[in-house]
């Protein structure tokens, strides 16, 4: 009911008067709860000096973390002021206070039996608000550990630490009771060294998740969201993934793309720069490449010279559309005046993510290049793009839709204009393997049939092929007519 009557921002300035409004307009505002984060951020010791204890309490209470509301960002001076003002009347319900203020609680403020809930609540604090001199994180951590030193935190200690575990460095993570993984599941983000430590712990096989080589999809789900942060250090040991990755040639590209989307990290990293590790000629030879790279990192970690050197290895292994777009963009950067035949030949399924503008920069004059681009196992072409590729080839003087060309383009013949199809000679069509014309228009089928009929009349030595052709062109045409 309080939230329904927000006062317009323009009327609100954090002054003594504002504080009084909250009392005067009691009907509208039962407390300071409706003040916006921006206004609460104006809290100063000076403005509240004369306010009553209960009013101050209300204000501090309004600054606590609340669902659906922006965090009230307070500075150390404000937080210590709040603490000092309430010092004598602090209670044990820690969620009533801004999490950052909990940093300034002293051991006297937390009853022994409430240690756990205190550490759980303070785990949400932004430790960076506290000046390094106070070293609050370290101090709290020592208190939580009750003076015990060493990096191996026991099960009980881990349980007391709760979300404070998110602040632990790698030394602690990799040497602690494996139950620490459960605490880490609630962290917002990890540093690279924290991830490495988690991986060391997981690879030790001493966790409840067992030996990494036995993990299955269920294990990954149970570990969620941690798998999103893991790298190929772990991926390479997971047998079912390893199997899929090493035998990826035999797998349907669409399935690989979807698998990739589901298991590859999509975390958003703060800051710029490659943090996962530069793509090198060694990493691209690893069967698990590019698992472990999210889109941003793939982009940042793949240098153009490395791409040029290793284009074939990279194109062989990258199935994700967005990653393929990164490759194509960098390829254009690498070769601003056009991509050579040799490079176009190793694009594999990456070619299917190309735009018409990309294709216009490719050199396609040799039958080997056309054949490489038309390989059906690399996925189907959009008609306009297939047309662009074949047209580019045919634009080279001396090139035509000969038998080898027809064998290479097969079903993609349906992407060509009828005027182009008409140029196929009966002899070339006769010598080609039976083409799949299922997706061709009636007009295209008719033209092909006419050529095929002539090719049969001119040479009756290959009746099987003629039968197939007739079946293909006439049969399909006839049945389309009858529907
Ligand atoms: C982790 O923190 C402890 C205590 O501050 C320190 O002694 C240790 O060297 C740190 N470990 C790493 C890997 O930074
Ligand atoms: C996990 O299992 C594999 C295969 O059985 C074995 O080679 C490896 O040593 C095991 N790892 C650990 C940490 O026990
Ligand atoms: C990655 O490559 C960039 C330049 O290509 C280099 O400056 C950086 O040091 C490399 N990083 C690592 C970790 O090798
Ligand atoms: C196919 O060829 C035969 C013999 O050369 C001819 O009689 C017939 O009309 C042709 N059919 C079509 C549809 O062109």
Image (cartoon, helix red, strand yellow):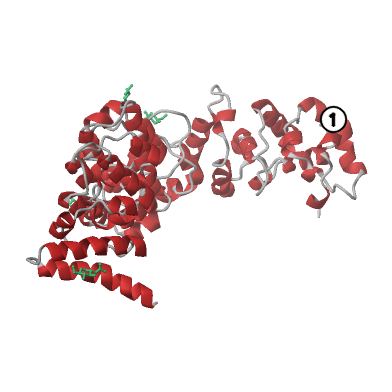
Q: Quadrant of the C terminus?
A: bottom left
Q: Which residue sits furthest bottom?
A: 482
Query: Along the horizontal axis of the image, is 146 left or right of 240?
Result: right
Q: State the residue in front, 126 or 4.
A: 4
Q: Position of residue 274 (x, y in %)?
A: 37, 30
Q: Residue at x 72, y 29 (%)?
A: 81
According to the picture, the residue beneath numbered tag 1 turns out to be: 15
Observer-nearest of 277 and 331: 331
Determine if residue 304 is in view: yes
Residue that sits furthest to the left in the current view: 461
Compared with 176, 467 (above or below) is below
Say which element carries label 1: loop
- Tell me if residue 150 can be seen: no
The quarter of the picture where the N terminus appears is bottom right
User: 160 or 288, which is in the foreground?
Assistant: 288
Number of callouts:
1
**Side of 461 where 9 appears, left or right:** right
Q: Residues within 10 Å of mark 1 (few under 14, many from 20)?
A: some
Residue 389 place in picture, x, y as percent: 30, 44
Outermost residue, right side: 24
Q: Does the numbered disc 1 mark a residue whose Cβ is under 8 Å from ligand 1? A: no
The image position of residue 415, as x and y in percent, is 33, 53
What x and y, as percent, mark residue 440?
Answer: 33, 61
């Amino acid at each position: 009911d309080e939230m329904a009557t927000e006062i317009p921002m323009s009327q609100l300035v954090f002054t003594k008067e504002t504080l009084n409004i909250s009392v005067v307009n009691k009907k509208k505002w039962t407390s300071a709860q409706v003040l916006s984060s921006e206004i609460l951020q104006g809290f100063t010791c000076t403005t509240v000096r004369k306010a009553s204890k209960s009013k101050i309490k209300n204000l501090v209470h309004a600054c606590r973390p609340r669902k659906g509301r922006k965090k009230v960002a307070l500075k150390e001076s404000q937080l210590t002021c709040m603490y000092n003002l309430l010092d004598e009347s602090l209670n044990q319900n820690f969620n009533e206070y801004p999490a950052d203020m909990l940093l300034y609680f002293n051991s006297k403020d937390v009853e022994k039996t409430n240690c756990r809930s205190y550490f759980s609540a303070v785990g949400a604090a932004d430790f960076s608000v506290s000046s390094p001199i106070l070293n609050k994180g370290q101090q709290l951590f020592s208190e939580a550990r009750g003076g015990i030193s060493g990096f191996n935190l026991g099960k009980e200690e881990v349980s007391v630490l709760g979300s404070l575990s998110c602040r632990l460095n790698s030394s602690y993570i990799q040497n602690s009771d494996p139950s620490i993984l459960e605490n880490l599941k609630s962290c917002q983000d990890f540093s690279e060294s924290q991830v490495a430590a988690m991986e060391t712990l997981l690879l030790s096989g001493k966790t409840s998740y067992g030996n990494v080589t036995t993990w299955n999809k269920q294990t990954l789900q149970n570990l969620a969201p941690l798998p999103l942060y893991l790298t190929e250090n772990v991926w390479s040991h997971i047998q079912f993934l390893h199997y899929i990755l090493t035998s990826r040639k035999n797998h349907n590209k669409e399935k690989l793309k979807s698998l990739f989307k589901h298991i590859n990290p999509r975390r958003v990293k703060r800051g710029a720069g490659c943090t996962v590790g530069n793509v090198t000629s060694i990493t691209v030879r690893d069967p698990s490449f590019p698992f472990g790279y999210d889109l941003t990192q793939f982009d940042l970690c793949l240098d153009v010279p490395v791409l040029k050197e290793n284009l074939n290895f990279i194109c062989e292994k990258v199935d994700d559309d967005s990653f393929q777009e990164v490759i194509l963009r960098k390829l254009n950067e690498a070769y601003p005046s056009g991509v050579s035949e040799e490079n176009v030949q190793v694009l594999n399924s990456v070619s299917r993510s190309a735009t018409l503008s990309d294709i216009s920069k490719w050199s396609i004059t040799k039958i080997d290049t056309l054949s490489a681009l038309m390989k059906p196992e690399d996925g189907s072409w959009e008609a306009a793009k297939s047309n662009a590729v074949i047209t580019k080839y045919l634009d080279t003087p001396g090139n035509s839709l000969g038998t080898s060309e027809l064998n290479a383009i097969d079903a993609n013949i349906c992407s060509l204009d009828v005027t182009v199809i008409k140029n196929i000679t009966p002899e070339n069509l006769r010598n080609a393997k039976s083409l799949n014309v299922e997706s061709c228009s009636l007009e295209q089928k008719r033209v092909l049939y006419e050529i095929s009929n002539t090719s049969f009349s001119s040479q009756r030595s290959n009746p099987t092929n003629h039968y197939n052709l007739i079946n293909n062109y006439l049969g399909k045409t006839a049945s389309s007519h009858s529907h």
